């Protein structure tokens, strides 16, 4: 029993260790910094501000598109290959090393935009490492809990992960990320003697995420072991045969088919909302990285609390109603974002230049308007509903998977999540190009949420396992 508790603890620590990639690198620090640097370089080349902002957003979206395609094409086969031997830990080790190398490489993104290509390569390696380790650790969930405990454990994992994301973001903002004056949120120069003029504090986000992961994965590697003592070697022919059999069975499993298709669309929309939330704040509301970071803290705190509460609801009601509620909330968030400018919400004027003093000025900056307040509230909604949606979706996949072939199933789940990973960024790019507006460019995300919601109608609450 003590060994089981240690194994569960080690498994939970993966979420804590890996979440800073999504919180710091994808959403709230590196993503906005990357687009701001690219947009600034384009402005220096004479491009108008709106066009420079739009082109920077398009580049960021296309990078994620190609990375997502590469992950989608390889995840199911790697999962099937791992299942032929029953061993997941060697794969977790390998992709963990990729993650650490990739995140550390984000340091090369200099403020003069000279490191754009290398930074994108490093980001691709880091994202592949993060996504693939997640596939293999998710596949361990069926061996850790049964029944309603699966939902509670999944929710607890995401709650712990978001709590880690909050702490990591607070550390970055307090000690490293430069505000416009060159000091951190505490009013001091970046720690470790980093040069604010070269944005070394902000660029340290990559090495910081690498160190964080390496440190907090120690409990995972100490306590987690493969759940099957299978001595067979991995077999490519057997993996390929198993994968083909799995894919051919999908048309005869309507609940699984609807689940994979529906979750494919709404998870694609959620990833886009995460990826472009900070970018939206930077390009539409003209926020600094520090303000985006505070936005991230609010969202991550909401996600930690909501994921834990959502896990309890999942355990009591099952994952499907929890998923439906979260998708509805996120759809409403996107609609509000599309209708909001710094001056108005759906044409209704909003107050600007609200007075801020003391701690409020330190956290939120000067000249905050009602639109900024609304966006902070939306950030909490995105974090809370997004955390609940991810945790409940992981539970629903467990209900559609064979425990003996869970890695293959979660590889297929990753494929369904990445098969259209190009779609949301592509649609955002098209809409942004067509409208010339980074704000209107995110409208397709709402349509993806709604399409996924429609497909959930055919998903059985208990899955399709007999």
Image (spheres, rainbow, N blue to C red):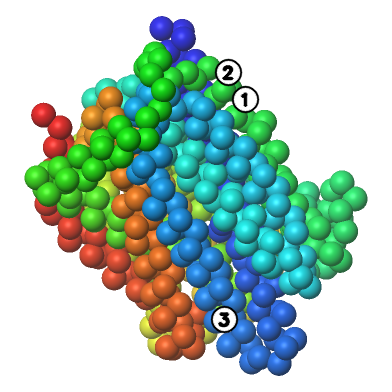
Q: Which residue is mark 1?
A: 218
Question: Is residue 127 visible in the rendered structure shown here?
Answer: yes
Question: Around disc 2, counting alpha carbons within 10 Å, would you say few (fewer than 14), some (14 to 19), or many (20 or more)?
Answer: few
| Image position, residue 399 (x, y; %) | 22, 34
State how far apart marks 1 and 2 are (Cα).
6 Å
- Camera-side residue: 42 or 349? 42
Check residue 222 in the rendering and tell me which mark sits there, or answer none. 2
Taking the spot 62% from the left edge, 62% from the top edge, the residue there is 120
Which residue is painted at 87% across and 46% down in the image?
192
The image quadrant of residue 146 is top left
Residue appearing at x 46%, y 85% in the figure: 433
Please tell me whether residue 276 is drawn above or below residue 457 in the rendered image.
below
Q: In percent of the image, x 41 and y 7: which residue is there?
A: 1
Q: CA distance from mark 3 to mark 2?
A: 45 Å
Say whether disc 3 or disc 2 marks the residue closer to the N-terminus: 3
| On screen, residue 421 above or below 408 | below
Question: What x and y, as percent, mark residue 212?
Answer: 66, 38
Residue lying at the far front in this picture: please name it: 237
- Label 1 residue SS: helix
| Residue 55's disc number | 3
Label 2 near label 1: C-beta < 8 Å?
Answer: yes
Q: Position of residue 9 (x, y in %)?
A: 49, 22
Query: Viewed as shown, does residue 146 lie left or right of 39?
Result: left
Of all residues, the one furthest to the right in this rendering is 193
Which mark sits nearer the N-terminus, 3 or 1? 3
Residues packed near mark 1 inside 10 Å, few (<14), some (14 to 19) or many (20 plus): some
Category of crowding for the residue at label 3, using alpha-carbon neighbours closer than 10 angstroms: few (below 14), some (14–19), many (at least 20): many
């Amino acid at each position: 029993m003590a060994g089981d508790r240690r194994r569960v603890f080690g498994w939970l620590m993966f979420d804590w260790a890996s979440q800073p990639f999504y919180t710091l690198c994808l959403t709230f620090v590196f993503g906005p910094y990357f687009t701001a640097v690219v947009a600034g370089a384009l402005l220096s080349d004479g491009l108008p501000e709106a066009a420079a902002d739009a082109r920077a957003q398009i580049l960021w979206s296309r990078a994620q598109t190609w990375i997502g395609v590469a992950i989608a094409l390889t995840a199911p086969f790697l999962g099937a290959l791992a299942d032929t031997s029953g061993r997941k830990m060697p794969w977790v080790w390998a992709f963990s090393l990729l993650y650490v190398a990739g995140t550390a490489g984000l340091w090369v993104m200099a403020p003069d935009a000279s490191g754009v290509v290398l930074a994108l390569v490093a980001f691709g390696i880091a994202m592949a490492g993060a996504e693939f380790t997640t596939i293999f650790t998710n596949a361990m969930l069926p061996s850790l809990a049964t029944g309603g405990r699966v939902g509670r454990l999944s929710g607890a994992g995401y709650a712990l992960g978001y709590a880690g994301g909050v702490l990591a973001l607070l550390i970055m903002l307090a000690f490293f990320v430069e505000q416009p004056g060159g000091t951190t949120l505490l009013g001091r120069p970046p720690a470790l003697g980093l040069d604010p003029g070269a944005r070394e504090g902000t660029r340290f986000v990559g090495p910081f995420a690498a160190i964080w992961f390496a440190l907090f994965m120690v409990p995972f590697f100490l306590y987690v072991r493969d759940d099957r003592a299978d001595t067979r070697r991995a077999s490519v022919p057997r993996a390929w045969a198993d994968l083909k059999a799995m894919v051919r069975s999908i048309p005869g499993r309507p609940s699984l088919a609807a689940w994979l298709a529906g979750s494919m669309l709404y998870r694609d929309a959620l990833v886009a909302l995460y990826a472009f939330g900070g970018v939206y704040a930077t390009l539409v509301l003209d926020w600094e990285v520090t303000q985006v970071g505070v936005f991230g803290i609010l969202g991550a705190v909401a996600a930690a609390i909501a994921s834990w509460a959502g896990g309890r609801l999942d355990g009591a009601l099952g994952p499907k109603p929890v998923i439906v509620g979260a998708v509805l909330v996120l759809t409403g968030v996107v609609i509000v974002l599309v209708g909001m400018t710094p001056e108005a919400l759906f044409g209704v004027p909003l107050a600007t230049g609200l007075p801020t003093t003391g701690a409020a000025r330190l956290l939120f900056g000067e000249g905050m308007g009602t639109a900024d307040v609304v966006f902070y509230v939306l950030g909490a909604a995105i974090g809370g509903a997004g955390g609940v949606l991810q945790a409940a979706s992981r539970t629903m996949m467990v209900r559609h998977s064979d425990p003996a072939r869970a890695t293959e199933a979660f590889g297929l789940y990753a494929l369904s999540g990445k098969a259209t990973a190009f779609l949301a960024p592509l649609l955002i790019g098209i809409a942004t190009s067509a409208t010339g507006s980074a704000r209107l460019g995110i409208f397709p995300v709402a349509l993806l949420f709604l399409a996924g919601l429609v497909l959930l109608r055919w998903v059985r609450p208990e899955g399709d396992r007999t």
